[in-house]
Amino acid sequence: MGIAKAGLSLLPKRIRIVPLSSLILPISDELQIVNSICARPLSYDALYDITIDNFDLGAAALSTMNDLFRDPEPNPADNLQITREVLFSALATYKALCKYLKENPCDMFYVFNGRFANLRAALRACQLRGVPCFVHERGSDLNSYVLAPNTMPHDPAFMLPYRSSTFEPVSMEVKEKVAHEFYVERSHGIIANWFSFTNQQQLGLLPDNWVQASQRLAVFTSTESEFASLRDFYPRGLYPSQKEGIIQIIKDFANRDYQGVLAVRMHPNSHDTKSDFTEELRQITCPFLIVIPPLNEIDSYSLLRTASAVLTFGSTIGIEAAYWRVPSILAAPSLYSDLGSTYNPGSHDEVIQCLLQPLQPKPIEGAINYGFFAKVYGTRFRFVVSDGVNDCTFKDRKVGPDELRRNLLYGLTNGRPGGTVLARALAEWERNRQRSLYEKVTADN
């Protein structure tokens, strides 16, 4: 909120800010239902199904908890106090905005992302009151954005026009060139609109005895949490979870005395999360199994390019495999599953069949359309220039955590350094931070 206020202060006209807390007090009696919800036995699925009016309250709360605990399926009962607080906050936002929008006609409403508890609450309140709501998110890079009208940007129906062959009437030659640039950048660890998680990997490094194997199957996991509480858009795949799916595949291979190599590459960003099940897989003793932990230096893209086939659970590397002419098998819904470039088995038996038989790569056109879309979609900023994920300039004035911290130090002291205890503590913290940076730079040099 502090960064938002700092940004709003740069606009030429004063913006009226209505504190959400002032809207919540009149509807506080309506929030007591949360105590009743938390008094019941709560499982993930039981909480997920709880709705209030048109608001998928349980799913919204769980989506926040997915990220908070870095767990695709957190147990609400294990964290009951946090569960209660997230539910209270989400329901308060929903009820307060429903009341406000009923009493204050609104032409248009903007909200970020729409997936998390309070943000989804705002979207649902707008939908209930018939207020046009535009949900904004990053576009293809940090200098662009998308606006999803009355839905989340995660909605496949919203994204479909962007991914189709009719998006942007340009020649296939141009699309191929742009898509190639996207896939090459990805393979070099360049992610235009977020952080890269493959920088620690060693180019060309492969597991021992990998290239010598007669068949090389690579499984790439995903972090799961982002889409775990979006079942309306992304129903569960063939398996209850990717962990259960991979274990079932390994056991099936063992029963068949599989003679090739099956490498499971844990997603680099799953380190220290419940999506990292490296140790569970290491308990399975099979001569064909290679388990690659999240922070291991083995090169994901060398693994992909040398694989006989690739199995994924919705991550982008599945469509990347298809582009590089490696047969790509999907075991969960994804944004690219309907583009014709992947194998989409409908059962576990079909997954095993796809993995064990020699496959030809699917047509590449769908992967080209996806790569083109991923490289260009969104509207370019006119007055904002991004400087990384967390910083930017607006009309040449910096907005971001560093600027906010300086404004806070100045504001707390009315321009006089050291005017309050808190300001002095913050100033000391700032000096220590700058000293640490200086010592790091001088040590590196």
Image (spheres, rainbow, N blue to C red):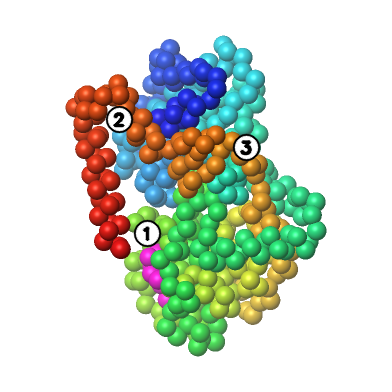
Residue 376: image location, x then y, percent: 66, 51
Answer whether labels 3 and 1 touch (C-beta < 8 Å). Answer: no
Amino acid type assigned to the residue bearing label 3 in the image? Arg
Residue 161: image location, x then y, percent: 73, 47
Instruction: Look at the image and tell me in which quarter the N terminus lies.
Output: top left
Residue underneath mark 1: 271
Instruction: Look at the image and tell me in which quarter the C terminus lies.
Output: bottom left
Residue 355 appears anywhere in the view: no
Q: Earlier in the sequence, mark 2 or mark 3?
A: 3
Mark 2 neighbour class, 10 Å CA radius: few under 14, some 14 to 19, many 20 or more: many
Q: Judge left or right: residue 419 versus residue 384.
A: left
Closer-to-camera residue (141/445): 445
Residue underneath mark 2: 409
- Residue 419 versus residue 170 in the image, above or below: above
Residue drawn at 30 percent across, 24 percent down: 415
Residue drawn at 45 percent across, 16 percent down: 23
Answer whether labels 2 and 1 touch (C-beta < 8 Å). Answer: no
User: What whole-number distance in Å separates the C-alpha atoms at marks 2 and 1?
Assistant: 35 Å
Q: Magenta stretch containing residue 131, yes or no?
A: no
Residue 222: image location, x then y, percent: 49, 59
Closer to viewer: mark 2 or mark 1: 2
Residue underneath mark 3: 382
User: What whole-number distance in Å separates the C-alpha atoms at marks 3 and 1?
Assistant: 37 Å
Disc 1 element: loop
Which residues make up the magenta segment?
289-297
Residue 145: quadrant of the picture: top right
Residue 425: quadrant of the picture: top left
Amino acid type assigned to the residue bearing label 1 in the image? His
Residue drawn at 78 percent across, 61 percent down: 172
Q: Earlier in the sequence, mark 3 or mark 1?
A: 1
